[in-house]
Every structure is written in structure tokens, then in C-alpha cells.
Amino acid sequence: MRTRRSWIRPLLWSLAGLLLLALLVWALRPAPVPVSTARVSVGPFVDSVTEEGRTRLRDTWNVSVPIAGYLQRVTLEVGDTVERGQVLFRLEPSPAPALDPRSRQQARDSLQAAEARLRASQANLETARAERRFAEAEFERYRALHQRHQVSTADLDHRRSQRDRHRAIESAAAASVEAARFEVESIRAVLEVASGQRDDEAYPELEVRAPISGTVLTRHRCCEGSVVAGEPILELGSLHDLEVQVDLLSMDAVRVRPGMAVRLAGWGGEKALEGVVRRIEPAGFTRVSALGIDEQRVPVIIDFTEDADPAALGLGSGFRVDAEFMIWQADEVLQLPTSALFRAGGEWVVFRVEESRARQVAVTPGRRSGLVTQVLEGLEAGDRIITHPGERVAEGVRLRVEE
């Protein structure tokens, strides 16, 4: 009996030591690494490029002043619609400048001199008329005497010559009277200008009409006043000819082709508008980004489709939109979150969850679109992968999976 007890006690102590060792090993082993996972899925995939753009008008018309003059007040305002041929604004001759006291006195003296010349011309005209009447009477008497053969033909011709000469002198005197009268009227018109203001008389007006039917985009001048030839007054355009300009990075612009579909969102409406790429500009430009990096940008011009009427929706020139270029799309594509991919040994790999442990798997990625990437080889639909593997995740590490 005593021998049996001596054998059981060491056995119990051995079992207790093994249990304590097992508890110590279990307590010191690494804890499972918490990870977030996602499933490899099959679904619609769109490879697109999204960039901010601005609406603009394909053609605009700047209506300017054809000649120098005095502009009447422009009643049209920005946003008003006009029809082709409608009067936009009117021009009238510029008012004469005001006279200073010295110039006014000189004009008065010139007027008095012109009036004196007019009176002298009128007196000369009366003298010429009297001499012409006398010469005509003399000619008639000599003609009657010539018919009775009492004077010679030479005397008759001499009287005819005198009559014609006095007629010409009368015509010249009448012309001198008209010239003097016009001179008086010209100087009098100068004196009638008091302070450079227009009087109440009606002036001929030049009406400038609209070249197109459209909307007033800009009013450069509203108030009346003197204008010079070529000065812009209004800018017109048709809102039905709106297009969108998007400045893409050159590396994205080479992937875009004319005729490619574009979704236009972020313009303020609930529904995205449809557009089509019309032209990719052949020359790019450099633009500094918000981070101070030089970027090569290429302008891309987008037309709205026939179903979209931007003017009816309230869009105008210079409005912001978000343009999404549909580079490639398919309905059944194997895809995974882009954040699950990382480089290891010169190839793309992911961590797949197998029996709560991490298994590194090499994959062949395809196209990328935002937060998802196409999978060509290496995974199957339904595989669970780690979306954001950290430094603690390695081959064979136990995991605590969080969906």
C-alpha cells in the first residue's frame, strides 16, 4: 500500500507540471492578427477617368461699335434673349465741343465779317442783274434795227456778246451770294454750341442689330456716352450650343478617343447627363497643381447628346461639371479591392484567408478603376482576401477575421 502511494504522487506532480507547461505555452503563443477581409466577386466593371470640366459656348459674337459716335443707353441686360435682326443699341453723331471765351469772341468776329461779305455779294448781284437787263434791252433794240438794215451785223454780234457776258457775271454774283450765305450759316452753327451738350433736335441714328438669335452673355457698356470705333458693347451666344472642356492629364488623354461616351455629373441636377467626345486637342499645356507639381494637361472637348438640352436644365457658360470618360466596361468581370494588392518579389500578390491563416498568393491584375481592380489569374470568385495587410500579416499567421 505504501509502495503504491509512492508511485502515484510523482505521477500527479508530473501531470501538474505538464499542465502548467501547456498553460504557459498557450499563454505565450502569438495572438491572432485582426484583419479586415473581402470576397473576390464577379460583376460589372467600368474602367473610367474622372476629371473636373467647365461648360463653354462653341461660338460667341462680340458686338462692337462700327464707327465713333455717341452711344444711347443700352437697355439689354445679361441673360436677356434676343432675336436675329433685333436692335441692340443705337448711335448718334457726337456733340460738338464747347467753345472757350476767346474762341467764342473769334467766332463772333468771323460771323460779322461773313455777314458783311454776304451783303457785299448781294449788292454785286443786284448790280450784275441791272447790267444784264440793260444789255438784254440793248441787244433787242439792235436786233430790231438789224432787221430793218439800219445797223451792221458786227454791231449786232457785239451787243449779243455783251448780253452773254453780263449774264455770266450775274451767275457768278449769285454763286458768291450762296457761298457767303453758307459761310454765315457755318459760323452761326459754331456759335450756337453753348456747352458741348446736345440740343433737342432730332439727329440721324445708327441702329446696330443682333447677328444671331441667342442670349446676352456680357454687357461691356450700359450707359450713354461717347464711344470710339471698335469698342465692344455686348457679347452674344446661343446656350443651345454649349459644350464641355475638360483638361485631362496627358497620360489619360492618350486613352481617350473621339466618339467615346462620357457621363456628366456634379452639375447640380439629380440625373447625370450623357455626352460624347468630339475632339482631343493636338497640343497640351503645363498647369501647376495645388501641390505645386507641374502637370501636362490636354484639352478635351465634349458635346452633349441630342437627348440632353443643357439650356433647358439651367446650365450656362462657365459652369462646373464632373466628366467621367468610359474607357472600357464589361458586365461579368472578376474583381477585388485595389487595397489588397501589394508587390513582393517583383510580382503582385495578395493574402488569401485559408482556415483562419494567411496564405500569400500571386495574382495577375488587369484594369483598374478607382477602388477595384480586375483579376486575370490567381484567384477565383468567392475567395476571401485581406484588404489592408499590415506589417504583422505574413505567410501562415493566424488571423482574427473581420468582414
Image: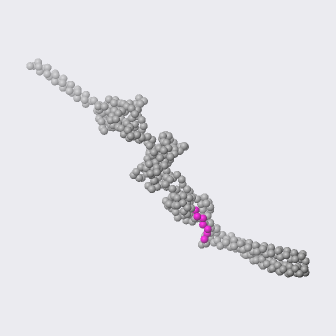
Q: Which residue is drawn at 61% across and 68% down?
A: 204
Expressed as whole percent of the image width and height from the top left, the position of residue 290 reads 47, 45
Q: Please say whether residue 142 is visible from this viewpoint.
A: no
Answer above or below: position of 402 versus 241.
above
Expressed as whole percent of the image width and height from the top left, the position of residue 180 reads 74, 73
Q: Magenta segment: does it hold 204? A: yes
In the depicted view, which residue is nearer to us: 196 or 265? 265
Q: In the image, which residues are magenta?
A: 202-208
Q: Residue at x 51, y 44 (%)?
A: 280
Q: Which residue is drawn at 81% across and 78% down?
A: 132
Q: Residue at x 45, y 52 (%)?
A: 308
Q: Magenta segment: does it hold 398? A: no
Answer above or below: position of 201 versus 353.
below
Answer above or below: position of 170 versus 360.
below
The quarter of the rendered structure image containing the N terminus is: top left
In the depicted view, which residue is nearer to us: 86 or 294? 86
Left/right placement of residue 252 relative to residue 115 reads left
Expressed as whole percent of the image width and height from the top left, the position of residue 240 reads 49, 54
Expressed as whole percent of the image width and height from the top left, the position of residue 141 reads 85, 81
